[in-house]
Image (spheres, helix red, strand yellow):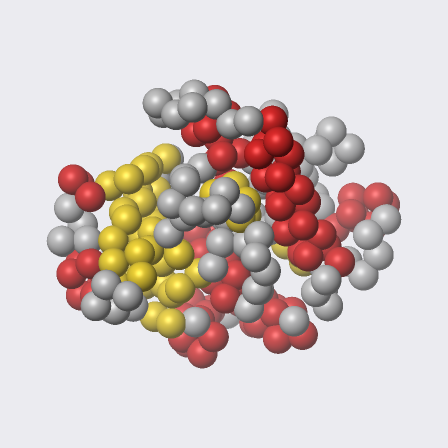
Amino acid sequence: MEAVSHSISKLFIRSGKRAKQSSSLLEDICRRFSLAEIKIATNNLDRDLLIGYGGFDKVYKRCIDDRIMNVAIKRAPFRPRRGFDKFSKEVVLVCQLSHPNLVPLIGYCINEPKMMILVYEFMLNGKLGDHLYGMVDLDPLPWKQRLQIYIGVARGLHYLHARVNHTIIHRDVKPRNILLDEKWEAKLLDFGLSKMAPPSLSKKALIRADSGVIGTLGSVDPEYM
């Protein structure tokens, strides 16, 4: 995980060549898909293949590598500066993390100036939020299963907070960012707002590290407010 700290610091070099340097760094640590590969997998980004969307993101379920695995292809418009920084941070972090309760990132694609794409392992049972809030026609989750899901989320957070050399704070844990695999195992998603914590995780240290509250209203830890 020392590589994570070094990689993230390189992403925020203040120079005119930042985007080019960041793109080169990403290729060193994670698989880069060509736009042609993405278009083949999604039948030229066919809307009929969409399995979800929100905000600026669109998600497709497709196969890659001669149908070896199903993947979820998350597409967003290319946004310079902060948008690219957020995208790069997520790629750098997730490519170097490994835990049963984190969604594995397979690779990425950048097509300037049109779009940014993340290719994740597909999670069969979708988002926890869809099961909790009745947004799709699904049976309610049994309480025992809900407990196991929450335990899985806690394990993923414990890994980020205590099992890596440099503590990572997710900052956007919510039901829509928790996916469920075929065994109903919970996996955390979306590290775009995450950051590395200071050496001390005391409340004062965290306050100094953050200039403002970031996250989703209703899901932010009250102590963070």
- 48 or 145, nearer to the observer: 145
Q: Examine the rendering and report whether any part of residue 69 can be seen.
A: yes
Q: Residue at the bottom extreme?
A: 28
Q: Quadrant of the C terminus?
A: top right
Q: Is residue 167 left or right of residue 35?
A: right
Identify the residue at image location x=41%, y=39%: 126
Using the rendered view, name the quadrant where residue 54 is placed. Answer: top left
Residue 140: x and y, percent?
A: 48, 23
Q: Is residue 125 left or right of residue 62?
A: right
Q: Examine the rendering and report whether any part of residue 214 can be seen.
A: no
Using the rendered view, name the quadrant where residue 39 is placed. Answer: bottom left
Against 149, is 37 above or below?
Answer: below
- 145 or 157, nearer to the observer: 145
Residue 75: x and y, percent?
A: 31, 49
Residue 214: x and y, percent?
A: 61, 39
Against 44, is 211 above or below?
Answer: above
Q: Is residue 36 left or right of residue 156?
A: left
What count of labels does the image hold? 0
Identify the residue at image location x=67%, y=74%: 2
